[in-house]
Amino acid sequence: MFTSRNDQRGVSMMHPAPSQHNHTRFYIVLITLVVGGIFFLLVMNDSNKQFGLTGSTVGLFDDGNESVTEDDLFVEDSPEAVQKLRSREVDISLQFDNTPLVNKEATIKHLEAHVKNPKTPIKINENFLELSDPETINLVLEGFSGKLQFDGVDVALTGKAQKIKVNGITFSAKEKISLVLDDADYSYLAIDEVELVDLTIPEGSGQLNVADKLRYTLEQEGLNFYSFVGKIVIDEQAENLLDMEGVAKGLEVSGSLLNLDVR
């Protein structure tokens, strides 16, 4: 019986060994999974430098030494920060599926409009221009200054131009020529070297590139430029309805001031 009890005790003392071995194996597997997960995230982060932000995507162009955080992108409503960004000029380009709403005095180096309705009245030096049944009107202005109005449908102009061309017919004089164009339905509008203050673009989707550094993918968001100088093209037949390129100050995206000083 004594020997039997020793044998039984010996058997019972050997039971914990397999349990300790199983725990060790579990920890090894767990550590392997954690290390593998971290490595996977690092690889994915390196291959895709863009990240989501309120339904949009923000990222940097090729520059391994730069990074952008969500706090970097938008500025809180401090007067100092707002004043700084509204005074800083930065190159931008925008491709968008909506058009600006403009009703302002403007000076324009070059403007071209393709007017759909051939019966649209055009007044040059107080005289209405009569055209012989064209299908469309191709209007080109050089050196225009005056009232500029346009949205995604109509364009209107009241002012003076150095040179006016209508369907290939050129009007020019030593003094600037007066022009009135009322609510012309257009399919193409290109405005080059125009300066606009407080430029608003209603909600839409597209892509904004800032200073070859920041790429912002817009998804049903509105834009407001404190000021913009550059080129605006609206083309119904193009892949992007609106194409803008120039220099901007103080850009707001859906009401939030975008940090154009990201370095």
Image (tube, helix red, strand yellow):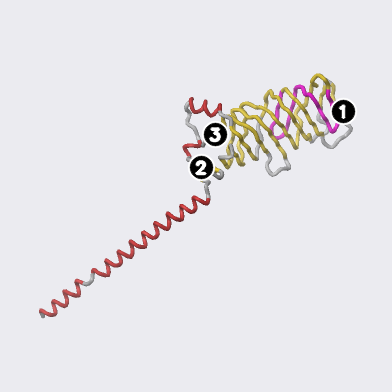
**What is the three-letter code of the residue carrying label 2?**
Leu
Query: Where does the image place residue 170, in percent across and percent down from the top left?
Result: 85, 28
Let me know if residue 125 is in the magenta part: no
Query: Which span of residues is magenta-colored?
Result: 147-172
Q: Which amino acid lies under the numbered mark 3 shown in the image of this protein?
A: Leu
- Name the foreground residue: 165 vs 104: 165
N-term-proximal mark, 2 vs 3: 2
Residue most extreme to the right:
132
Give the position of the N terminus as an image quadrant.
Answer: bottom left
Q: Is residue 226 left or right of residue 7?
A: right
User: Which residue is rendered at x = 73% and y = 30% of the image?
Assistant: 155
User: Which residue position holds label 1?
Assistant: 130
Q: Separation of disc 2 and disc 3 at Cα?
A: 16 Å
- Badge 2: residue crowd in 10 Å (few <14, some 14–19, many ≥20): few
Mark identifier at residue 53: 2
Q: CA distance from mark 3 to mark 1?
A: 49 Å
Name the residue: 19% across, 71% down: 13
Q: Residues within 10 Å of mark 3 (few under 14, many from 20)?
A: many
Circle 3 residue: 260
Q: Nearer the viewer, mark 2 or mark 1?
A: 2
Give the prevailing secondary structure in the magenta stretch: strand
- Residue at disc 2, secondary structure: strand
